[in-house]
Image (tube, helix red, strand yellow):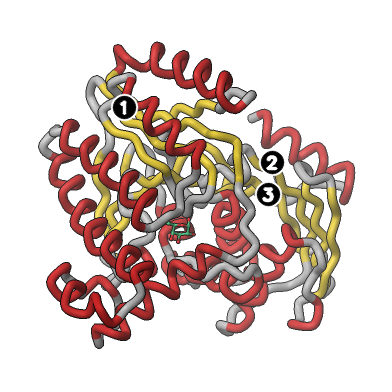
Amino acid sequence: MELQNKIDSTFEAKFGGHGTIYASAGRINLIGEHTDYNGGFVFPGAIDKVIMAEIRANGTDKVRVYSIDIDDYAEFGLTEADAPGQSWARYIFGVCREILKRGGKVEGFDAVFAGNVPLGAGLSSSAALESCFAFAMNDMFNGNSIDKFELARIGQSTEHNYCGVNCGIMDQFASVFGKKDHLMRLDCRSMEYEYFPFEPKGYSLVLVDSVVKHELADSPYNKRRASCERVAKRLGIETLRDATMEMLEAVKSDISAEDYFRAKFVIEEKERVLTVCDALVAGDYATVGRCMYETHAGLSKDYEVSCEELDYLNDLAKECGVTGSRIMGGGFGGCTINLVKDELLASFIETAKARFNEKYGHEPKIYEVIISDGARKIAEAAH
Ligand code: GLA
């Protein structure tokens, strides 16, 4: 309620009156990292941390938007030439443009937004922002005629075409399709998905946020994707979804060592998602946890998207007897996701905070994971 009130009073102060309030969520991913753009499986869920926006059509062809968290204002038109300079505003501009490119309708509007998805933590604050505005534009200007998958794709295309990230579909899918107390297994080739109830008995999911973000200049995410695409091409298949370790071994001498290890991780990871889904249904948390540690090792050694701080948090989890732990999201900083027995939770958090602080001079942030709903309308204009 606090977030909503802040947005509402700011909207009134900036623009007068009230708009309609929408929100969309950040996400966690239990397992299945860097598999989405390889046509594999992912297993995310939306969380209780959101980006929320109050929006009202303004009868012009201009968008006027204020970000409370960044304390910055942007104004832009809706043609390709009108791209705003601020990077945060390009997410909103991109969503508008992608809807228009698909033949949808967007008119000028006023908006104020804020959120509580931590930035740079690997919880997809940008997908939450895109999904919030895509959902809102669909509701306000398109009579909700754009289907939910298309809303997710609009966010993904925004990343590709306006933000320079060749991401997969996982984050936007999770943000749009999220359902309280459910994880979702998505097959990123067929786009079939299934909801899995997530109520682990005697266990909790907790995120340990290193609060470090290694900004790497040469777009390492896009480079990982390019490696995978090169190997798929060499194998004569569309994506690594159809690759096996035998196929990879057969071309090992024709590809770089780096590409080999990238592909090896993806091939192993897509199997792990299926193993974890089965284990979860069977209540076999030991297997879920083992796979999480395997994923971390692969992301760290083969895919090389971890960093010293995250490896240290993973080691700490192991030392504390945590059932499963791994770096989550794209990598290069952010947080670990940990499956912890309830009786160990307090001591793990205490140890992780103290030991990390000792080594890196600041405490990590801790977030309890609460699986929640995705994109939605919060309140009508006349609230
Ligand atoms: C980022 C991307 C996703 C996905 C993950 C890694 O979050 O946006 O599409 O590739 O990294 O699993």
Residue 379 visible within the image: no
- Residue 285, located in which quarter of the rendered image? top left
Horizontal side of residue 110 vs 92, given as left or right:
right
Q: Residues within 10 Å of mark 3 (few under 14, many from 20)?
A: many
Rendered location of residue 82, percent (x, y): 81, 77
Identity, as a three-letter code, of the amino acid under mark 2: His
Rendered location of residue 355, percent (x, y): 50, 19
Query: For mark 1, what is the residue?
Result: 318
Real-space Cα distance between discs 3 and 1? 40 Å
Rendered location of residue 274, percent (x, y): 18, 53
Residue 152 lies, with reference to residue 215, above or below; the image says below
Identity, as a three-letter code, of the amino acid under mark 3: Ala
Q: Nearer the viewer, residue 7 or 208?
A: 208
Q: Nearer the viewer, residue 59 or 135?
A: 135
Residue 80 visible within the image: yes
Q: Of the residues under marks 1 and 2, which one precedes in the sequence?
A: 1
Q: Secondary structure at mark 3?
A: strand
Q: Of the residues under marks 2 and 3, which one precedes in the sequence?
A: 3
Query: For mark 3, what is the residue?
Result: 53
Identity, as a three-letter code, of the amino acid under mark 1: Lys
Q: Of the residues under marks 3 and 1, which one precedes in the sequence?
A: 3
Q: Secondary structure at mark 2?
A: loop
Rendered location of residue 305, percent (x, y): 45, 53
Residue at the image point whose x is 46% and y is 21% from the top: 352
Q: Nearer the viewer, residue 116 or 59?
A: 116
Question: Quadrant holding ligand 1?
Answer: bottom left
Q: Mark 2: is the Cβ under 8 angstroms from ligand 1? A: no
- Residue 50, located in which quarter of the rendered image? top right
Query: For mark 2, what is the residue?
Result: 383
